[in-house]
Image: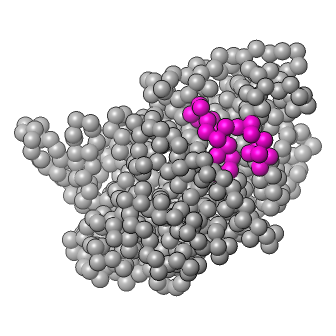
Amino acid sequence: MKRNIYILSALLAGAVGLTGCSDFLDKQSAAYDSDGFYRTDAGLDEGVTGAYALVPFNLNWDVPPTMVQDVYSPYALQDQENTTIGAGGGLTPDQSYVNSYWAGHYNIVARANSVIDGAKTDRSDMSDMYKARLAEVKFIRAYAYYNLMTTFGDVPFFTSSVTPDQYGAGRTDKKEITDYIVAELNEIAESGDLAWKTANRGRTDRAAVYALISRYCLFAGSLDFGGEGREYFKKAAAAASEAMAHRHLAGKFNDLFTLAGQEKADVLDEILWEIPYSTAGSRKVHRTRFGHTSRTVGGSSVRFPSSLLACTFECKDGKRIDESPLYDPKKPSANRDPRFRETLLCHGDTMQYTLSGNKAVLNVYDSKTRMFPNPRKPNEWYSGNNLDVSGVGASFAKPGNGLLWNKYNTDLTEGFSESSIDIIIMRMAEVYLTYAEAKIELGEMDESVYEAINAVRRRAGMPDFDNARKGNQDLMRQIVRRERKVELAMEGVVFTDFRRWQIGDILNEHPIYGQPIDEIRYEGLTAADVPNFKTTQRHDINDVANFEHFKDKLTARDLQRHWEPRFQWWPIPRADLDRDPNLTNPEGY
């Protein structure tokens, strides 16, 4: 059951936005002893809770980083033109999101190091609970470093509290960080100090440790750290396999993103780590739906999926939209992979927004739209004000994109401006696909690989992929990359993946094309108005849609969109450059 949360002691006062749904966050101040605060079971427990509390720091509109990260990839965008960081817009050492992302994760590192330094690792009388908490806080630190390394590249690396004479340490090589963390995580996993499945939602467990190892190693393998790419892929596959032996997929995709679904046993088996929120009054702290939905139905929309993502979803026959006879440019959400509607919404889709059955048809063109029920005739539809077009403020219609996020938005038990659905950080679908990708890169394509991908597809209601792909490394790369995008969009994974695959250049070579212009509208499109995915082999393998042959029919935004090699890594914030003269950014920042 989800519960209210008590304020922690003054020691944890910096943990802004602490939330929870499990007993482990329901803490009063713990007792000190003469050896030090973190050397007691209660003290360490509270210190680790403080580290957990820093994970969901506010990056954008009260939404934690894992949900916002994909907006900083080319697969999503913000309402203001040319500000999408994934396309280089605003990517400077002074950019507020860059600064917040850096500071938020180093705050986690600092808290974790403080707890580890103060713990009694020099004694043999540690309780099982004490050992578990030490393992958890090291995992939390590893998670923070993963996000820093995959975003900024080589970063300052500290495994204990920083002293003033260490401020000039400069960057540490990504490979050195990876090898240290992977070794530490393997030690944690092999120690048995953590259960395979946590009894307290929000805490990490042994399966999550293996999942994080697989994340690190897949990233290192993709970028061939130290020329050891194959070895990292082997480690990624092995770690994923360990998790797959003990945890499994949930039965229904959408159950993962609703309050009721997240109480189900099979869903809890898939979720490896989540940010817990409370259903109690003022403790509903993230505004997922408010920033991602329609103004017409009482919300707002400031972050959007892009057409590059939308076009990646297959039709329900298992074929890409340029290959399927089921795809209709006039009705782009019809006959698609069920995850399309569960992840995205677009013009013409009907959105239900209350439990009592209130509905509206999303419309990017007209000042009026169809709504239900009619206030005067409750069983009929009527023409109501379409605030996405005629209202004040941002909406999914005005920036010319025409797409909305729907993931996490289908639960109707709460209001648009607040939500207590737990936000998933890691889950088994990612692990299945990581296992498959690592084995594909090794050239070890066998039935275990095919089954891992197809299990994810079947759960979504999609057919198995075409047998003609089997044994063909490029075609298998294509399908596993496609699955990662459509399965894990808006979960922070796509943000890292496009860096691993090194495709920022082909994703940003053109403006973002959105809804058809007013003079054409969707009904004016023809069967020929289907994106081209075969500009080059790289475009094809990575499902990068090209709209150039019918761009005059479409709205275009982010006209300054471009890519430079330095955009592979974010710049280190200027304040830290000033503090440490040994920290430098690539030329041009």
Q: Nearer the viewer, residue 272 or 279?
A: 272
Q: Where 101 falls versus 284 (above or below)?
A: below
Which of the image's four quarters has the C terminus? bottom right
Q: Position of residue 131 (x, y in %)?
A: 77, 32
- Chosen colour scheme: one colour
- Answer yes or no: is residue 110 visible: no
Q: Quadrant of residue 226?
A: bottom right
- In the picture, measured across the screen, residue 395 lies left or right of residue 277, that is left
Res. 350 visible in picture: yes
**Placement of 303 over or under 277, stated as above or below:** below
Task: Find residue 4 and report its horizontal and vertical position in percent.
Answer: 51, 22
Residue 10 image offset from top left, x and y in percent? 70, 20
Q: Residue at x 68, y 19 (%)?
A: 9
Q: Which span is picked out in magenta? A: 186-212
Q: Is residue 207 magenta?
A: yes
Q: Which residue is drawn at the image coordinates 38% and 66% (left, top)? A: 463
Q: Nearer the viewer, residue 117 or 228?
A: 228
Q: Tell me which corner region of the image, top left, top right, bottom left or bottom right, holds residue 343.
A: bottom left
Question: Is 378 one of the magenta-colored residues?
Answer: no
